[in-house]
Image: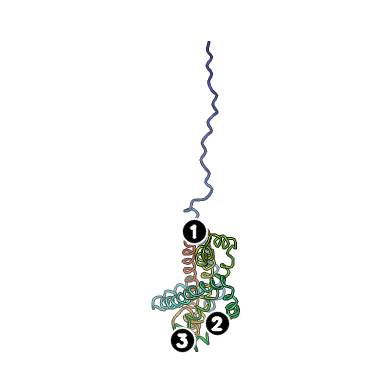
Amino acid sequence: MTITTTEATAPARPRTRPRRTGRPAGGQGLRTVGLYAVAVLVGLGVWQLVAMKYGPSLVASPKETLSAARELAADGTLGNSVIASSRRILIGWGLGVLVGAPVGLLIGQITIVRQLLEPYIEFFRFIPPVAFVTLAVVWLGIGETSKVVLIFYTAVFIVTLNTSAGVMAVNESKLRAAASLGASRRQVLQRVVLPSTVPYILTGARLAMGNSFLTIVSAEIVAAQVGLGSLIWTSRNYGRIDWVFVGIITLGILGLVYDRILRVIAMRVLHKYGAKV
């Protein structure tokens, strides 16, 4: 007689779907846009309440400011002011980045260069550009050069200091490892120092951009016929508080746009380095 047996099999486990650890990208983006919209609406509401309390002679309401912006845009004043200020900022800031980054690399890598330049950098960076406005006009005239030089002065020290800090923050073990593998000084700079310093350079560039907006207003108030700073000062002389608000808000919007563009560029450049800006 033969006995047949059946092998016991373990009960099959029910299939479970993997949990989603994050929210959908589209939903997160909508949530961010919604929060921004709420913040803007709250700000407009507070602005309206303050304008109602103090009156149009002191605070222009959002409606009055919008009407003034349309008025200035219609005759070309606003557009010309934005173009003039943007051109001066971008040229001066760009020159500051182009000069400040290489100088910062030299200061961070070569001790004798750091010792020679550090006293001047530490001295001049504490003198605000506003203090040089009169001298810039006397030496360089009321043309574009004086304003571009002031913005360059604003940007170059910030980029230089951030770049040199990035160079000196490079891990010493990385430098020794590259040297032990036979890398030349130039290869160490290209493959170790520069990739580690790029985040510092971009951060310095963003900070320099913000300070450039601070400088352009004072420079244009003193020596410019066209520009957002000139628009604000001229509006004050005419008693047009609404025009003043237009100039101030335009500066803020312009700075926000430029900073967002820099952030997008920085994120793309730094993606391969695993850094965030």
User: Please, what is the three-letter code of the amino acid marked with disc 1?
Assistant: Lys
Spatial CA span between label 1 and label 2: 39 Å
Find residue 41 and report its horizontal and vertical position in percent: 51, 64
Q: Give the structural element (helix, strand or loop) at label 1.
A: helix
> Tag on residue 32?
none
The residue to which callout 2 is attached is 130
| Mark 1 or mark 2, earlier in chain | 2
| Labels 3 and 1: the sequence-earlier one | 3
* Residue at x-position 50% and y-position 63%: 191
Give the mark nearer the N terminus: 2 vs 3. Answer: 2
Residue at the bottom extreme of this rendering: 138
Q: Amino acid at mark 3?
A: Ile
Q: Quadrant of residue 69?
A: bottom left
**Tag nearer the camera, 3 or 1:** 1
Residue 53 location in percent, x, y? 57, 73
- Mark 2 touches mark 3? (CB < 8 Å): no
The image shows residue 129 at horizontal and vertical percentages of 54, 81
Reading the image, the residue beneath label 3 is 142
Can the viewer see residue 177 in this picture?
yes
Q: Up-down: is 48 above or below 34?
A: below
Q: CA distance from mark 2 to mark 3?
A: 15 Å
Q: Which residue is mark 1?
A: 272
Q: Tell whether label 1 touches label 3 (CB within 8 Å).
A: no
The kind of residue tagged 2 is Val
The part of the image, by quadrant, that contains residue 119 is bottom right
